[in-house]
Image (cartoon, rainbow, N blue to C red):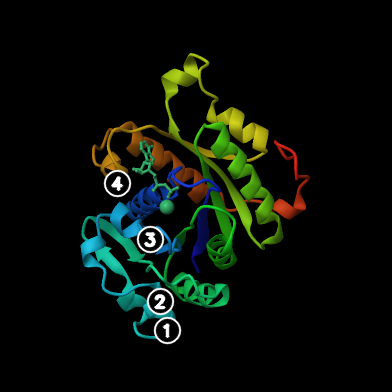
Amino acid sequence: MARIIAVVSGKGGVGKTTVTANLGIILGGMGYKVTLIDADVGLNNLDIALGLEDRVVYDVFDVISGRALPEEALIGSQDFPGVGLLPSVKGSEGIKAAAFQAITAIYAKTADYVLIDAPAGVEQGFHRAVSAAKEVVIVTTPHLSAVKDADRTLEALGVYDVDVCGLVVNRVIPERVQKGEAVSGDAIAGLMRLKLLGELPESDEIGINSLSAPRSESRKAYIRLAEAIDSDKEGYRVSERKRFFLFGRK
Ligand SMILES: Nc1ncnc2c1ncn2[C@@H]1O[C@H](COP(=O)(O)OP(=O)(O)O)[C@@H](O)[C@H]1O
Ligand SMILES: [Mg+2]
C-alpha cells in the first residue's frame, strides 16, 4: 500500500508541480514505484513539467468514467524509471472528491508512493486532492505572501484526515539568506511549527532540467528532500496539535 501524499501550497506558482515531478523522479530512481496524479484540472500541467505532454492519451476523467483502465492510463518514460503519470484534463472540474479518492486508492494498491499535484487555493480542487491523500507536503517560497497562504492552507487542513509531513521551501537563494536579505527555511518552518523537509534552491534550469546535472545543487537538494520524506513515516495530525497561527484569523 502506497503512501499517498498531496503536494499543496495555498499560493499558486510556488512550485507544487515542479516539486511533484522532481520528487517523483528521485523517488523512482531510489527504486520505488511512484504514481503521479495531476489533480490541478485548471492548469493541468504536470505532463508538461515532465515533458510528457505529447504522450497523453488518457486522463483522470477517462479512468473515473471507465473508458480506460487505471494502469492503461499511466504514462511512463524510460527517462524516469518507476514513475507513471496520470494526467489531468481541462473541463473536469465536476469530478467528485469521492470518485477521485476511489481511483487514487486503486493506484495506491500497486505503488509505493502516490503523489498528488494539488491546485492552488483551498477550494474544490484542493478538497478533491486532500480528501484522496493520507499525508500532505506544504510547499512555499520564502516570500511573505506565499508563507501567509501556506499558513492558511495549514489551517484548512485541520478538518481533513491527513498527516502533515512538513514544509518544503522552494526558490531559496542561499546568498540572500546569508546576507540577511531573505528569511531562512528553518525560520519559516519554525514560525509555522512545521518540520522543514527541505530547501530547494532557485535554479536557472527549468523544472526537471534542474535534475539533469548529477552534481547540481537542485539535484542534491531533491535527493535530501526525498530521503527526508522517505524516512519520515510518522507526520502528525494538524487537528491534534495546538495550532499557532502566524497572521491571526478572520
Ligand atoms: N526552484 C526553482 N527555481 C526557479 N524556478 C522555479 C523553481 N521552482 C519552480 N520554478 C518555476 O516557477 C514556475 C511555477 O512553478 P510550478 O511548479 O508550476 O508552481 P505551482 O504548481 O505551485 O503553480 C514555473 O515556471 C517553474 O519552472
Ligand atoms: Mg501546479
Q: Specify which label sits upstream in the sequence, 2 or 4.
A: 2
> Mark 2 highlights which residue?
61
Find out if the beta carbon at label 1 lies less than 8 Å from the nearest ligand 2 atom.
Answer: no
Q: Given the image, on which type of amino acid does mark 1 rest?
A: Ser
Q: Where is ligand 1, by quadrant?
A: top left
Q: Specify which label sits upstream in the sequence, 1 or 4.
A: 1
Q: Given the image, on which type of amino acid does mark 3 rest?
A: Asn
In the rendered structure, the answer to whether residue 18 lies left or right of residue 232 reads left
Q: CA distance from mark 3 to mark 2?
A: 12 Å
> Mark 3 highlights which residue?
44
Q: Given the image, on which type of amino acid does mark 4 rest?
A: Ile
> Mark 4 highlights which residue?
208
Q: Which mark is residue 65?
A: 1
Q: CA distance from mark 1 to mark 4?
A: 31 Å
In the rendered structure, the answer to whether residue 21 lies left or right of residue 138 reads left
Check the picture and name the quadrant holding the C terminus. Answer: top right
